Amino acid sequence: MLMGLSLLVASAGWAGLVFARGVLDEDQSRQLSARLADHEVVHAVLTNRLGEGMERYVPADEPMSRQELRTVAAEALADPFAAAAVREAISEAHLLGLANDEAEPTFNDFDVNEAARHALLAARPSLSGRILVNPPVRVRLPVDGLTWFSGLKALADRFALLALTAAAIGFVTSFIVADEPTPVLRRGAWWILASSAGWMVVGSAFAAVVRFTVPSSYVLFAVALEIVLRSMRDPAIIMASFGVGLLSVSYLAPAIARRRGALLLERARDRLGPMTQPADSSSPSDGDDPSAIGPLPATAATSTSTSTTDAEHVGMGSRLSAAWKEGHGYLDDARVAPFFSGPTRETLKRSGD
């Protein structure tokens, strides 16, 4: 539960940090306005509204259709001076939104007026002399909703870094309090992979929402969010790579631990070497009749049995033996620890049994 909560807070903090540096930063206003003006959705809205502003200067005896006006407006916005004026107006509206002030809804600029006039004359040469020099073409900028950036900025400035710090502390603590850290690491890796996949998908999904459902008056606000969400793709790829690394570690670490335990057991057997039966005065000589001596004492019989068992057990050091396979797959500390304190015959006998 601590791991899941920490990763959830981390996702929110990371998103807030990206929004703060991508959309809510005043120093990035000019770069953002350039990207907004070049976006196809924003460009389409500006073209349509510039065409509406140019319509009033078209004489009634030479009418132009809406499609013709949009084509002429697109030519006017292709003018570099007009495009620079539009980007500057978008940047000012963005800065005012960050300050919780509403921008002027209508936009009028000398360069845009001249570009519109020249585009009209290029499309209809017969209008020469019938259009005013520098006609005031008013354009309604789609600036609704930009004041919401001020609230998002205050929220991000207060809680983004705090959320990331708290998430990091919770992430580390979850490994400390867990009985077994490997499943925690595995759950964290799957969460990171799912989160990165979500960030990669949400940008494209939000782009579809902007194109089909967002009103034109809110298009600057919506496209700004879309740009930030799309910019999350590269960090999401890096995060996915990190998740794959964590997932690999969660599977490799237990295998390495089991392999280490098996090697410790095998080295301990190699250090002991083969055990031979000690000489005993009660053992029969080559010339003696065993039946005449009688049965061995209980201690001697136990020693002989133990020696045989030890020899067989130590001889099972090959990698194909049952003892090695058991140690490789299921060895735990309780069976490895006796070798560090000096194993006895009885310890080896119990291990062999």
Image: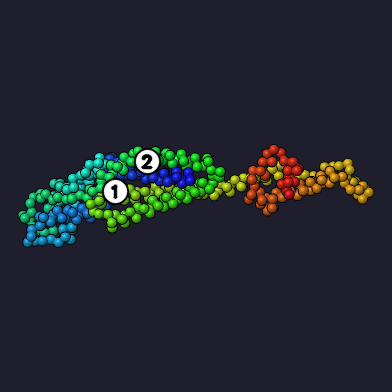
In the foreground, 156 or 43 = 156
Q: Which residue lies most toward the front here?
A: 1
Q: Is residue 163 left or right of residue 257?
A: left
Task: Give whichever of discs 1 and 2 has the lower sequence position.
Answer: 2
Q: Is residue 31 left or right of residue 66?
A: right
Residue occupied by mark 1: 224
- Total residue callouts: 2
Residue at screen point 72% across, 50% down: 316
Type of colouring: rainbow
Residue at screen point 49% across, 40% down: 173
- SS under mark 1: helix
Residue at screen point 34% across, 41% down: 156
Crowd tier of the residue under label 1, counting other residues whose Cα lies within 10 Å: few below 14, some 14–19, many 20 or above: many
> Quick check: 10 above or below 320?
above
- SS under mark 2: helix
Residue occupied by mark 2: 160
Q: Position of residue 101 (x, y in %)?
A: 22, 41
Q: What amino acid does circle 2 point to?
A: Ala
In the foreground, 334 or 204 = 334
